[in-house]
Amino acid sequence: MIPEKYLDLFDKKAFASLATLMPDGTPQVTPVWCDFDGRQVLVNSAKGRRKDINMHERPQVALSILDPDNPYRYLEIRGVVTEITEEGADKHIDKMAKKYLGLDKYPYAKPGEVRVIYKIEPSHTSSNS
């Protein structure tokens, strides 16, 4: 579902803007690190955050990923969160810290924080080319 010519965005330090839905139906947008497992887009966050609550209650999401080398090149992905799991989430956030920060360990963990991976199944993509 992700066009091959845009797969490179998942190898770059490309931030995504993740749109979730609030209880009243209005959008809520957060910049996030993102990953791709070959089928699903992966986003990692902590339990209890607004996007976590929104994705549990309303799994329809959209992401816009800008190419950091050319901000006029982007990929929009619409989809549904099909799985939310704590399994492997700490290891995954460390992988994302390596990609985005060049660090082996995620440095912003708070005591008692529980990491979660959201697996997003793309249903539609669009781009500017």
Image (tube, helix red, strand yellow):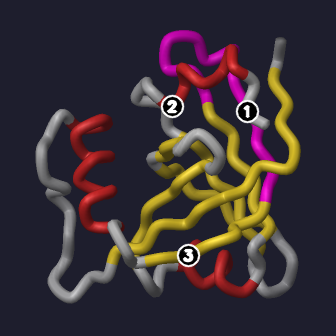
Image location (x, y in percent) of residue 29: 65, 58
Q: Earlier in the sequence, mark 3 or mark 1?
A: 1
- Please tell me which residue is depicted at 20% across the width and 69% down the height of the picture: 109
Q: Which residues are magenta?
A: 66-79
Label 3: how many residues lie within 10 Å, few (<14), some (14-19) or many (20+)? some
Give the residue pinned by disc 2: 10
- Looking at the picture, which amino acid does disc 1 mark? Ile
Q: Main SS type for the magenta part?
A: strand
Give the residue pinned by disc 1: 2
Q: Quadrant of residue 51?
A: bottom right
- Please tell me which residue is depicted at 15% across the width and 57% down the height of the picture: 107
Report how far apart the C-alphas of labels 2 and 1 lie in the structure. 11 Å
- Please tell me which residue is depicted at 20% across the width and 62% down the height of the picture: 108
Above or below residue 125? Residue 37 is: below
- Asked whether disc 2 touches disc 1, contact meaning CB atoms under 8 Å apart, the reply is no
- Asked whether disc 3 touches disc 1, contact meaning CB atoms under 8 Å apart, the reply is no
Residue 109 placement, left or right of 87: left
Give the residue pinned by disc 3: 84
Image location (x, y in percent) of residue 19: 70, 58
